[in-house]
Image (cartoon, coloured by chain):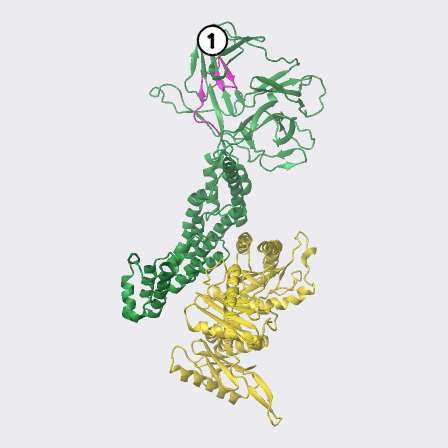
Amino acid sequence: MGEEDYYLELCERPVHFEKANPVNCVFFDEANKQVFAVRSGGATGVVVKGPEDRNPISFRMEDKGEVKCIKFSLENKILAVQRTSKTVVLPEKRNLKLLKSQNINVNWYMYCPEGAVILLSTTVLGNVLQPFYFRAGTMSKLPKFEIELPAVPKSTKLNLSERDIAMATIYGQLYVLFLRHHSRTSNSTGAEVVLYHLPREGACKKTHILKLSRTGKFALNVVDNLVVVHHQDTETSVIFDIKLRGEFDGTVTFHHPVLPARSIQPYQIPVAGPAPVTSQSPVPCKLYSSSWIVFQPDIIISASQGYLWNLQVKLQPIVNLLPDKGRLMDFLLQRKECKMVILSVCSQMLSESDRATLPVIATVFDKLNHEYKKYLDAEQSYTMALEAGQSRSSPLLKRPVRTQAVIDQSDMYTHVLSVFTEKKDMPHKFVIAVLMEYIRSLNQFQITVQHYLHELVIKTLVQHNLFYMLHQFLQYHVLSDSKPLACLLLSLESFYPPAHQLSLDMLKRLSTANDEIVEVLLSKHQVLAALRFIRGIGGHDNISARKFLDAAKQTEDNMLFYTIFRFFEQRNQRLRGNPNFTPGEHCEEHVAFFKQVFGDQALMRPTTF
Amino acid sequence: MLLNLLSFTCKEAEENKILFYHPNEVEKNEKIRNVGLCEAIVQFTRTFSPSKPAKSLHTQKNRQFFNEPEENFWMVMVVRNPIIEKQSKDGKPIVEYQEEELLDKVYSSVLQQCYSMYKLFNGTFLRAMEDGGVKLLKERLEKFFHRYLQTLHLQSCDLLDIFGGISFFPLDKMTYLKIQSFINRMEESLSIVKYTAFLYNDQLIWSGLEQDDMRILYKYLTTSLFPRHIEPELAGRDSPVRAEMPGNLQHYGRFLTGPLNLNDPEAKCRFPKIFVNTDDTYEALHLIVYKAMSAAVCFMIDASVQPTLDFCRRLDSIVGPQLTVLASDICEQFNVNKRMSGSEKEPQFKFIYFNHMNLAEKSTIHMRKTPSVSLTSVHPDLMKILGDINSDFTRVDEDEEVIVKAMSDYWVVGKKSDQRELYVILNQKNANLIEVNEEVKKLCATQFNNIFFLD
């Protein structure tokens, strides 16, 4: 198995602590994610390490007997030590206040710090769970719910063990995960993980079932909203994504592993000790060891080796393990660090060797643009709410977060499309089909297409002399009007004369480019057309006479010059009551030329009243 | 009206000169004499204008049109002037020829079209000569024109024949992109397809062929192939045929060329052969025309590949369902756009528009073309005025505008702006020049506001 095959790995910089032994007890606090190494009951030292704080806290305390549990309060302010089953000692003197009391028979409890929810196992079988929710110093009782046990239990002893229950936040929602070793339905073998959605309000509901198709010892983690199920017998893990499409039976969605089972990537333990002393090579770490303890959401602790790791998902290897590109995109778009991987998938599916079919490419583009559009819409409603006078500090108004899953046009252009169109060996039909597919997808989601994408289409068409195709695209306004595009078209006129007309049409439609139209016409010596155009839009009182007279003179058509000259004389008459040009208009040479060709008497006489 | 259509080459002598002569029954010597005369005329006029020899010859009874489509190959068409029979004072009928009725440009264009159509299905004259000498060329001409002349209806030719334009189907961007996507996917799945064209309601939406080739193919499709299939459609004989086929979506696709019944194992997969890009790459292609409801797709594949029945079945199963969905999408979208733009309520102007750049043509004067005649809604006299204005426009490069008060109460306006021409016929009693001008401005503002068309 090559390295590119493992999609789960242990983090590179684990928390290292003194391994558990008869004189050193190790504790883990899930709330603060801290490991406590307590030597000789604390007398010879307590070392506390967390994944965030690289500076361990060390202290000593009196040995007053075996420590059963040790924890810091939030921000390490208060230390609590439990030595007997019914007393908790706070080393400093504090006042505790009983806020609320509930009287319930409890088999065991489980606390989820992320969700601030405590779960109590009640009843004889233990399968009725009572959640409580803590918020701002209050505790609220949530509706209790029953975990469906695999089969009707024969005995009336505790049937639900806390080992088979976990709580985790997946896609922002709190779930209770139940590892059911045997399916309820007789026809399917193998264990399954049942997900109960635990909302802050309303009843807890069974929503998802993850089919493991195997039996044995399992452990659960949740990483990047994925449920990871480790299987000790085979020393492999599988991942589930509850957002991916599964089989829905009307109440519950059944999921299968996203990918084939794989081991966590082999891990080398760096050999401790001062560097010059050790010459040993790193030792391979025993994975799926029976001494591993797994905590939510993503923590694996090996007490015997003295390590705490965070489990991580590697996205790049998944690209090759998930052949269905649509499903791959659905999967990647939900991951935190997905952007570069998604872009590499796009590049790959357009490459000569791994080329996907157009329908697949279209599906991928649609999925990307769906996500992109969602963000644009959120952005827009945020801006509109601000404009409507809503305060920035209003709790209802949140600036939308741009996740890595938002792949915009500029990302696609820079990382995928511009590189793709540059490839020499790519059949141009395919290149154009891909560009059009991307433009179609953007249009379908009503996203305004950026002009650089249009330029890319034009460039590709021009490179292959496909001017008639270009003409047709423009005819149907597939390439949206813009000044840069109109200018680009003008520059193509020498290769393809109709580009001139296309460009003028575009400038006309823009309706903000009247000056450009006049310039284009004058450069083509179409002086009369330019004048008629400017008159048609009512701008002829503000144009420079000199500019038009210059252009008319250049045509060497004296009658045209006469017409243009006369037009401006009439304008002068109308505006100033005198046909003569003012010195500011700098038309002296044209007046001289006019006199020279047509004679002094041809000049218009001022109308006298 | 058609007296003769003949073709000759200056490369051969005597009898071999004559490549084609209609009517064929004419006695051989007369054929030789007439061809000789034609050759003499073009050679003689060439001395005055080497690059542009005579295009037409006007005589009292008829007009002759000359065209040299390929070097040393000539085509000549002789058309009879219209006749009016009058009673003389003594009661005898006199035949009077109307020498000024026919428009040169219309019939020269028709003659050119004859050649283009021949070339589309047979390739160039020169190629035939190279492949099989005069004999082969003669055979091809005979075979082609024998059928083609029956479809030539000279009396209904007009301005539109000069333009030889293409009517484009108006469509919103999104639907157009869907069609693009469809075409690209089809070309990918049916990898032997080299070019594709897409039409809806006999109007073009996409052409993978170059403009000149598309122009003549469009002419063939809209005046010959499609009309031939209208009647069975109207009779409802083309309801979904393959509904009974297992595993197949019900669809309305069917071949207009090629196999009629895919379930018949003996079905022939013969498709018309066409020749495109004859100036450079000279490609021979099979023309597969496939239609679902109002949407027609032309798939063109290299002639060296012989499409099999399996291929046709595969095409049918891939294209049929998708094209059916697409056709109904287009129809729906078109109706939505029509309602939104309110074009149903607009006053009906009678006009013809043509753009030389993309060959786009639009006429509210012509009714739907049938295989036999193109029906116009205006009097032939007015059509002739349009033709005359067009001739005027051809003579100069500048933009121009002509307003004509015709007999009766009609005004005819012709406008030329850059490469575009617009002809409007107005029927407004007692209207004056200024009012007519205003009306035309109004038309331009509603119909042509998205193009650069000078007022």
Quick one: which residue is furthest to the front in this view?
Answer: A609
Residue bearing the label numbered 1: A42
A493, above or below A232, in the image:
below
Shown in green, the chain is A
Residue A455 lies, with reference to residue A266, above or below; the image says below
Q: Give coordinates of residue B266: x percent, y percent.
A: 65, 64
Residue B65 in the figure: left or right of residue B153: left
Q: Position of residue B263 (x, y in %)?
A: 67, 60
Few, some or many residues within 10 Å of mark 1 (<14, 14–19, 20+): many
Say if the magenta span includes residue A32: yes
The segment highlighted magenta reads: A9-35
Whether B312 is drawn above or below B29: the answer is: above
Please name the residue shown 67% across and 36% down the image: A249
Q: Is residue A384 above or below residue B288?
A: above
Q: Nearer the viewer, residue A372 or B336?
A: B336
Coordinates of residue A29 in the picture (x, y in percent):
51, 17
- Indicate the chain coloured yellow by its letter: B
Tell which subunit mark 1 falls on.
A
Residue B413 picture location, percent across and down? 51, 69
Question: Any magenta on residue A129?
Answer: no
Dot 1 amino acid type: Gly
Q: Is residue B320 left or right of residue A294?
A: right
| Res. A427 in view | no
Q: Secondary structure at mark 1?
A: helix
